[in-house]
Amino acid sequence: MLRGCNYFCNFAAVQWNERLLESLSFHFYNTLGTYMIDKNVVKKFVDEWLQDKDYFLVGIEISQDDKIVVEIDHADGVWIEDCVELSRYIEDHLSRDEEDYELEVGSAGLGQPFKVAQQYLNFRGKEVEVLDADGKKYKGTLKDVNGNDFTVSVREKVKKEGAKRPVLEDVDHVFQMDKVKYTKYIISFK
């Protein structure tokens, strides 16, 4: 009898919460029964701040306990002053009265895997490491980016016809951004 009651009560609560959810402006109802800040709303604020700037959005993550992490990037690096300015802009548009949250704004890490196409464009001509879908690593120069495809030029030993020994040559490998496990910039201190 109690199980049936619990099921009915939970069902009624879910229906009520769904109606309540429709009326909320920047929250959504998660599986734990708590409200979370909507990622699309945060993205809208970030996009507004990014207008007319050379920065671009790399990613937004919102955890179950409302920790918001925003990553931005720029071809010439990210200035801490701009991270602070974006953080304040987001805070000015979210209400602390309606939701308690933690906000972290930063740059995509230099040695971290690329997440968006603009990062590939920014690192053309630089040394990168690619881990393909089969688990094979390639290290070489990011030569070209065309839509979802990118080309990495790798120094490889190639056996020439009639030659006794293989010779080192640049060999181009074409990958698709969404088909590799990761691509990341190789930090060199040479």
Image: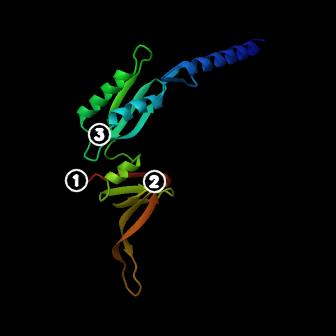
Mark 2 surroundings: few (<14), some (14-19) or many (≥20) residues within 10 A: many
Q: Which mark is residue 177?
A: 2
Task: Please indicate whether residue 76 sits to the left or right of residue 134 in the image.
Answer: left
| First in residue order: circle 1 vs circle 2 | 2
Distance between mark 1 and mark 2 Cα atoms: 27 Å
Task: Farthest residue to the left: give it.
Answer: 190
Total labels: the figure holds: 3
Image position of 128 (left or right of 34): left
> Which residue is found at the position 45% from the left and 24% from the top?
66
Which one is in front in this view, the residue at disc 1 or the one at disc 2? 2
From mark 2 to mark 3, how far is it between C-alphas? 25 Å
Q: In which quarter of the image is residue 49?
A: top left
Q: In which quarter of the image is the N terminus?
A: top right
Q: Which of 32 and 23 is in front in this view?
A: 23
Please tell me which residue is depicted at 73% across the width and 15% down the height of the picture. Answer: 8
Q: Where is residue 22 in the image (x, y as percent from the top left)?
A: 57, 21
Mark closer to the chain start, 3 or 1: 3
Q: Provide the secondary structure element on which disc 1 rests.
A: loop
Say which quadrant the C terminus sits in. bottom left
Residue 45, image x, y percentages: 39, 30
Q: Position of residue 173 (x, y in %)?
A: 42, 65
Examine the image and state in which quarter residue 50 appears.
top left
Distance from disc 3 to disc 1, alpha carbons, whole Å, reads 30 Å
Camera-nearest label, 2 or 3: 3
Residue 189, numbered label: 1
The amino acid at mark 2 is Met
